[in-house]
Amino acid sequence: MSRPARHRRSSPRRAAFTLVEVIAASVVITLVAGGTMLALGRSIKSRDAATARYEAFSRAAAAVETIARDLQNVAREADLVRTKVGVLPGGDPGAERDQLLLTIESNRPVRPALIASGQQAEAPTSEVQYRLQNGPLGDDAPGTLTLWRRADPLPDDYPDSGGVAAPLVSGIVSISFQASDGVEWLDDWDSDNDGYPHLVRVTVTAAAGNPARTVTARRTIAIDRSEEHTSELQSRQYL
């Protein structure tokens, strides 16, 4: 017996992609890839900018906190000649190079050998000076300097020299100090003539990254004024 013939279903042939479809797909892929790369690039730039701002803030904050700690330990004497709070203005607006001179009470030695051996301070008070200058290696970024702290454990007639100077924070754009007499802020102050200030304001601007990102940190420190000091100032005003 002969088998009945089987009828196969006929299916339409699958057509290949047309040139127009290929071009359209390529354009879409290119746009998606370009958008992804653009978003990635912006993300990287944003991350780098945030990192630079954080580093700049860390530098400015470290400088301000170190200076504030010394201001809180200013030596207090009835005879103001035996102590010092001095603000020396310098630099230009936006690029201030002010200096700060202090006599502080400290139980930490100044000389590295004594610090390493854990010995006590050479004297109960020390002269301290803050200023901006080039770093120890001279590799500060353009437009920035390094904050230095100089300490002299033997106060003498030359409060702006002697002792041991050490670099603290690099990448500093500007540093300014202002002292208040309780009425107004002054850019210049000398405790020998003006007495103890009521307040000292410290402003530090630091930079980091390329292109540079700048951040400014500021802190106001109150100077303790006892009745003894007030009496001394009043007696000077009547002379």
Image (cartoon, rainbow, N blue to C red):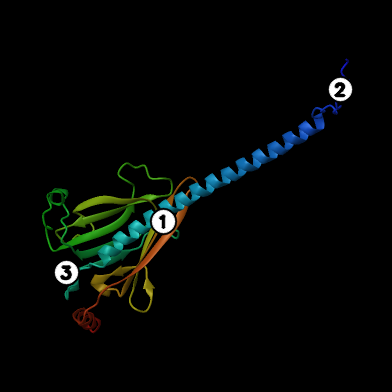
Classify mark 3: residues with Cα within 10 Å, few (<14), some (14-19) or many (20+): some
Seen at 45% across and 49% down, the residue is 51
* Residue with the mark numbered 3: 82
Q: Residue furthest front?
A: 1
Task: Answer left or right for 86 relative to 156.
Answer: right
Q: Secondary structure at mark 2?
A: loop
Label 2 – label 1 distance at C-alpha: 84 Å
Q: Which amino acid, by three-letter code, is at mark 2?
A: Arg
Seen at 13% across and 51% down, the residue is 114
Vertical relation: 6 (above or below) 79:
above
* Residue with the mark numbered 1: 57
Question: Which of these two is toward me, 74 or 15?
Answer: 15
Seen at 21% across and 56% down, the residue is 151
The first of marks 2 and 3 along the sequence is 2
Q: Which amino acid, by three-letter code, is at mark 1?
A: Phe
Q: Secondary structure at mark 3?
A: helix
* Residue with the mark numbered 2: 6
Across and down, in percent, residue 145 comes to 37, 50
Seen at 37% across and 54% down, the residue is 59
Residue 47 can be seen in this image: yes
